Image (tube, grey):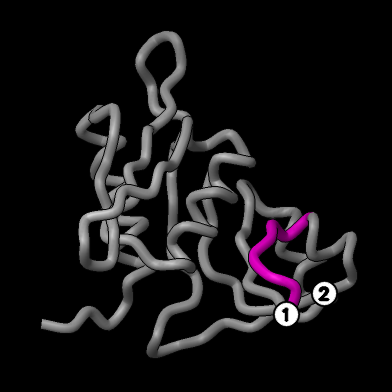
């Protein structure tokens, strides 16, 4: 069975792992998922991400991050753009959206970046998801 939205599946696995208080989550790998996970590590929402070769497409082993009182660092994660409704934002749209809670992850012509980095670079792109 084919998956229509692998990014939504990726985010759901992370959300479910956080709510179940797992220390790590294994996700089928792709280049886009790896870049998203590395961006979340850079933003201090995840502890680490490792690529494990399994002879097929590979597995991403994501280590979730928690506060000292065992609360997840990720309070919420929500998909913005989806296959049935792509949401593209210009620099002007990003100025308005950057005032909202959390970080918006944008797919630009220069790769994946947060809304603040895209504003600094003067770029727009497809809004993938918001994390807070």
Say left or right for 132 vs 51. right
The image shows residue 75, relative to residue 6, as above or below, that is above
Q: Residue at x 39, y 10 (%)?
A: 69
What residue sits 22% from the left and 56% below the top?
54
Image quadrant where residue 79 sits = bottom left
- What residue did someone put label 1 on? 109
> Start and end of the magenta stretch?
110-116
Q: Nearer the viewer, mark 1 or mark 2?
A: 1
Q: Residue 92 in magenta?
A: no
| SS at mark 2 in the image | loop
The residue positioned farthest toward the front in the image shown: 55
* Label disc, if present, on residue 74 of the rendered structure: none
Residue 94 position, x and y percent, is: 76, 68
Find the residue positioned furthest to the left: 1
Question: Is 112 one of the magenta-colored residues?
Answer: yes
Q: Residue at x 44, y 9 (%)?
A: 68
Q: Position of residue 111 (x, y in %)?
A: 68, 70
Q: Seen from this angle, which residue lies furthest bottom?
A: 84
Viewer-nearest residue: 38 or 116:
38
Q: Residue drawn at (29%, 59%), measured in percent from left and top?
A: 58
Nearest to N terminus: mark 1 or mark 2: 1
Residues packed near mark 2 inside 10 Å, few (<14), some (14 to 19) or many (20 plus): many
Residue 100 point in image, percent of width and height: 67, 53
> Do the CB atoms of the residues marked 1 and 2 lie less than 8 Å apart?
yes
Q: Determine whether the residue tagged by mark 1 lies in a helix, strand or loop.
A: loop
In the rendered image, which residue does mark 2 sit on? 123
Q: Quadrant of the N terminus?
A: bottom left
């Amino acid at each position: 069975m084919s998956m229509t939205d692998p990014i939504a599946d990726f985010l759901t696995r992370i959300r479910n792992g956080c709510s179940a208080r797992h220390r790590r989550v294994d996700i089928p790998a792709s280049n886009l998922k790896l870049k998203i996970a590395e961006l979340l590590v850079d933003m201090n929402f995840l502890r680490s991400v490792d690529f494990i070769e399994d002879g097929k497409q590979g597995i991403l082993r994501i280590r979730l991050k928690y506060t000292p009182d065992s609360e997840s660092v990720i309070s919420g994660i929500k998909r913005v753009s989806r296959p049935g409704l792509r949401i593209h934002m210009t620099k002007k749209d990003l100025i308005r959206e950057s005032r909202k809670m959390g970080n918006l992850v944008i797919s630009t012509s220069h790769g994946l970046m947060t809304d603040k980095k895209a504003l600094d670079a003067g770029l727009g792109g497809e809004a993938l998801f918001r994390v807070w």
